[in-house]
Image (cartoon, rainbow, N blue to C red):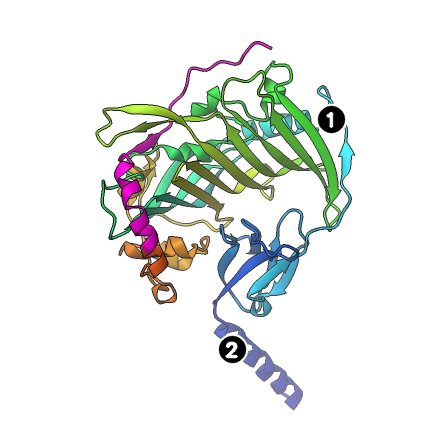
Amino acid sequence: MNYKSIFTILLLSLSGVILAQEKLDSISAVIRDAETGEPIQYANVYVSPTCGTISNYDGEFCLRCLPSETVRVSCIGYQRITSRASELPAVIRMQPISTTLREITVTRGDNIIYQLVNKMQREARKHRKAEAQYFFRMATQYPGTDELAEAFMTAKSCVQIRDITFHSGSRGQLRGEQLDGPSLTGLGRTNLHIFLQLSPVLVNFDIWDYTFVPADIVFRQIKNLYEVSCVQFTEEDGTEISKIKVTGNPSIISRPVLDGTLYVDRKNLRLLRFDGQMHGLQIVLYDQAREQHFYTGIDYSMHVDYRHDHGFTEIANMSGIITKDSVRIRQLLYNLGDKKLTFNKSARVRENMIQAIDKVGFDSTLWVTNNIVKRTQDEERVAFKDPTFWLANKSKYATTPSSEQQRTDNYLQNAIRQLMDNTMQLQRTPLTPRSS
């Protein structure tokens, strides 16, 4: 063997040692609009089919990957950013796509909405058993009280979330120590998981059968149910996006209606994203003993991103915010991709998701070994108050309320006494559409 061959073998061996020694690194950053400086929520951060995450409500994300791997950050309407993990900046500034929107005429009889809805219905029938694994989070805020629930779950994922099964989860609660009044157990008895089942195209109506959604432009025989407008723009990769705005007509609708904006890949006829709001939704509030209740209206907004790498329209991630006076509930769902996890326990969710989360218990290894959506600092404070949550990075966060927070707690003392110990339970309302 000559010296050249020996040198080559040694070089290859040394390269193998270096590669073998490369370890997973934790990278964190915040994603902002380069022009406004505002955080970009729910941007997609992708490394591979088994490694990725999304930015949280504050535009932050944390990801474990090899320093040499390529990270791609993308969001509809912005230029994509690609970088080695080791070179990713702490603040990622995404440039909005500069393009001229072209208005498109939308007719009732033959337009992209009809084609899209019919295609998604066919996909739902063909892939009705398709499932995905998700990470779920729900943060609830009352005056003086913050609650957090997190879990890993499995659900039918084609077109619309359904048949939810939890496998591992935990909850935490943080209360202002100087507050008087009743104990707020807002997460104790809820069926708010049904908001995860809401979609612009429904394949399983369940409790939402009394609600109008954009697909009803096709399926309901109600004239002028929605007003529709459409513009088109082109992404930097050449994808032509139709931005379709559907607005419910209040003059003919007397039941809850979901409207908003759909982003559609026009050439491939794929729904990419939906930003929606629900109007006219009523919930019923119960007292702690569930002896009295009353109906009240709430505000609800939602965001959904879709993926198509499995050959059908699948929920990639979704978020929703429920607000009523001083109560705020924020939900988040993230598709874990092609990485399949093994669970020891399962609990099918029926009317009470919190009972299901409590039943399966907490497996800390799932939080340590998987990329979950980064918590906001407020969510971290709530999680760390509960010893069952994973506490590996506790020292990085302030868990003691600031003097300003303490003053706010004092201010809320009188308000908390007037707030009943209620839980939220969605109920159907016997409302019917007005005649067209």
In the picture, which quadrant includes the C terminus?
A: top right
Task: State the SS at label 1.
Answer: loop
Closest to the observer: 352 or 212?
A: 212
Q: Quadrant of residue 392?
A: bottom left
Q: Quadrant of residue 217?
A: top right
Q: Earlier in the sequence, mark 2 or mark 1?
A: 2
* Residue 160, x across and y down, in percent: 51, 33
* Residue 19, x across and y down, in percent: 53, 73
Closest to the observer: 1 or 164?
A: 164
> Which class describes the residues within 10 Å of circle 1: few (<14), some (14-19), or many (20+)?
some
Q: Which residues are magenta?
A: 407-436
Closest to the observer: 421 or 276?
A: 421
Q: Residue at x 61, y 19 (%)?
A: 225
**Does the magenta segment cover residue 235?**
no
Task: State the SS at label 2.
Answer: helix
- Asked if 93 appears above or below 76 in the picture, the reply is below
> Which class describes the residues within 10 Å of circle 2: few (<14), some (14-19), or many (20+)?
few
**Does the magenta segment cover residue 423?**
yes
- The residue labelled by disc 2 is 17
- Asked if 217 appears above or below 123 in the picture, the reply is above
- The residue labelled by disc 1 is 106
Closest to the observer: 351 or 382?
A: 382
- Relative to 328, 201 lies left or right: right
* Residue 350, x across and y down, in percent: 34, 31
Marking on residue 296: none
- Relative to 70, 204 lies left or right: left
What amino acid type should be assigned to the residue bearing mark 1?
Answer: Val
What amino acid type should be assigned to the residue bearing mark 2?
Answer: Val
Q: Nearer the viewer, mark 2 or mark 1?
A: 1
